[in-house]
Amino acid sequence: MAAAGRHLGMTAVAVLAVATSLFGLSDASAAKKVAFVKKTVSSHDIVIFSKSYCPYCRKAKAVFKELKKEPYVVELDQREDGYEIQDALSEMVGRRTVPQVFIQGKHLGGSDDTVEAYESGKLLTLIGIDSKDDL
C-alpha cells in the first residue's frame, strides 16, 4: 500500500512537471509575476487587479470614482501575462477571482469587500479621508 502511495506521489510530480513544461510556466516565471504584483502594490496607494469586462471590477472601480480617488488598475485581460499574474495573485491572497484591491500595500479583498469597507467607513480611513464630508 505504501508503495502505491509513493507511486501515486511520483506520478503527480511527473504530471506537474509535464504540465509546467507544456505551458511554459516555471518557478522563475511564477516568481517574476509575484514580484510584479508586490512591486505594483508597493508603488501605488490604491491598486485594482481587474478585467475590463467584469461587472464586479466595474463596481469596485466605481467606489473609488465616487471617492475621487484614482486607483492604479491592472487589466489582466488586456495583458499577455494576465493569466500568470492572476495565478500569482491567487498564490498570494488565496483567491483567483477579480477584482483584487490593495490599499497602501495591504490586501483589502474583492468587490464585496471594497463596497463593505466603503459603507462601513473603513475604506475612508484606509485611504486617509476623515469623512464623506471631505469629498
Image (cartoon, helix red, strand yellow):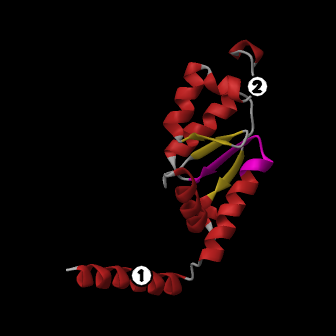
Q: Position of residue 106 (x, y in %)?
A: 66, 41
Q: Position of residue 17 (x, y in %)?
A: 47, 84
- The magenta stretch spans residue 135: no
Categorize mark 2 by other alpha carbons within 10 Å: few (<14), some (14-19), many (20+): few
Q: Position of residue 35 (x, y in %)?
A: 71, 62
Q: Quarter of the image containing the N terminus?
A: bottom left
Placement of 113 over or under 50, stated as above or below = above
Residue drawn 41% across and 81% down?
Answer: 13
Which disc number belongs to residue 13? 1
Q: Residue lying farthest top?
A: 133
Closer-to-camera residue (6/11):
6
Residue of label 2: 128
- Alpha-carbon span between mark 1 and mark 2: 48 Å
Placement of 52 over or under 104, stated as above or below = below
Which disc number belongs to residue 79? none
Amino acid type at circle 1 is Val
Q: Which is nearer the N-term, disc 1 or disc 2?
A: 1
Closer-to-camera residue (44/7):
7
Q: Position of residue 57 (x, y in %)?
A: 56, 45
Write down the region rendered in magenta: 41-52
Q: Quarter of the image containing the C terminus?
A: top right
Residue drawn 56% across and 66% down?
Answer: 83
Residue drawn 55% across and 41% down?
Answer: 109
